[in-house]
Image: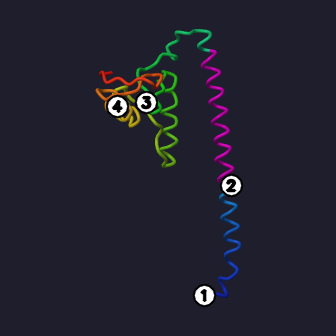
Amino acid sequence: MVTNKTLEGIDRPVQGWINWQQKTLSDCQARLAAADAGRIGQLKLLAAALEALEPHHHLLEATGMVYSDGSPELRWHRAYDAPYDAVAARHGIALCEKAMSAGEFDRLSPTKTSAARLFFWFGGTKARHDLDGSKERSQPA
């Protein structure tokens, strides 16, 4: 029979093990972030060298797609997708973010849509201040 007395001292070793696991996980995440930063630095250097040697190389061309942050996708970015997705699928984690068309980006970007709506609302026929803030005008923008 389990009593409070038998469970009394068990929480200390268990908490110690949990703390050790959290520290180990944190260390692994930090090492992964550092490795990612190093690889990104290497890739930027190689891309800059390729651009210096052959500025119009087909790997440096934009694909016409954009990422969720608005940055353009270059052809060499596509080399990342398949290897990442293969490992992600094996480990049951989310696949990598794919670039989208400019139309999809415009449709899915809440800040862009909101900014356009605000400009329409405040910039339409409403009175607004001139650039120096002193004069108001009520002409359409």
First in sequence: mark 2 or mark 4?
2
The kind of residue on which mark 2 rests is Thr
Mark 1 is surrounded, within 10 Å at the Cα level, by few (under 14), some (14 to 19) or many (20 or more) other residues, namely few
Q: Main secondary structure of the magenta part?
A: helix
The kind of residue on which mark 4 rests is Phe
Image mark for residue 122: 4
First in sequence: mark 3 or mark 1?
1
Q: Which residue is mark 3?
A: 99
At mark 3, the secondary structure is loop
The nearer-to-camera label among 3 and 1 is 3
First in sequence: mark 1 or mark 2?
1
In which quadrant of the rendered image does the C terminus lie? top left
Mark 3 is surrounded, within 10 Å at the Cα level, by few (under 14), some (14 to 19) or many (20 or more) other residues, namely many
Q: Position of residue 62 (x, y in %)?
A: 46, 18
The kind of residue on which mark 1 rests is Val
Image mark for residue 2: 1
